[in-house]
Image (tube, helix red, strand yellow):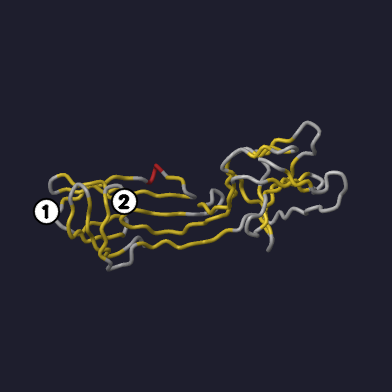
Amino acid sequence: MRGIIFFGAITLTGCTSVALNGAETKFTKVDYPSVGAVTTAYVGDQLVQKGEVVEEKVLRVNSFVDGAIYDIQPGTYQQIGHTAQENFFSANGVVRAVLADPPKALVLSKKEGAQLCVISVFNNPYCYEGDYEVKTRVSERGTSFQQTLIYSGRVGNKINIGYREFSSSLARPAFNNDVEYDLSISNIIGYKGAQLEVISADNNSIKYRVVKNFP
């Protein structure tokens, strides 16, 4: 791409210390929809959600960065540290030239339009332009946990609901279940403490009111 801004390759001026204080995380409580709200969902949609989501920042490199000293492979790079001015990410996926120093980390300033820099083991930065961005995703290292009910359609008087649990964005198959409810018996359906009043339903969508969400 690609020009390189070459800091400190010959001298040790412009060195960058790498912060190793971990990822910035954000805890968000999920409780959707609110009790009493009338909501419409479609087949495959989540009817109710309850839990806590832990999110973290990651660096997404969208296309190959071809540098004179280091190449940066496309992919997602975990955050390993941060300061008020910069975000630091894992260097796994960075390929060095034959005589280059091993890479220690990637750093991206929080300023708009900043270049992505590879930090060597001697704290020298080598900076490149490219197609990259900082994104937020559900943390694979956190303690996220969600319960949800999913609408699976209607056959005759019966509707099908799927129960799913997720831990750190991964489904927990042992706790998943699919349940069938007969609306000719009752239009109040429930699972694990969550209760819904079914107002109308067909094989495309369902209109419902939340009586209680998961405890």
Does 2 appear above or below 195?
Answer: above
Whole-percent x, y for residue 89 in the image: 66, 49
Image quadrant holding the C terminus, namely bottom left
- Residue found at x 73% / y 35%: 96
Whole-percent x, y for residue 102 in the image: 77, 39
Q: Amino acid at mark 2?
A: Asp
Q: Which residue is mark 1?
A: 184
Q: Under tag 1, what secondary structure?
A: loop
- Residue found at x 45% / y 54%: 145
Does 104 appear above or below 27?
Answer: above
Whole-percent x, y for residue 30 in the image: 42, 61
Q: Which residue is mark 2?
A: 45
Q: Amino acid at mark 1?
A: Ser
- Residue found at x 46% / y 45%: 170
Does 40 appear above or below 131?
Answer: below
Is 35 or 18 nearer to us in this picture? 18
Answer few, some or many: residues within 10 Å of disc 2's Cα (few below 14, many 20 plus, some between 14 and 19): some
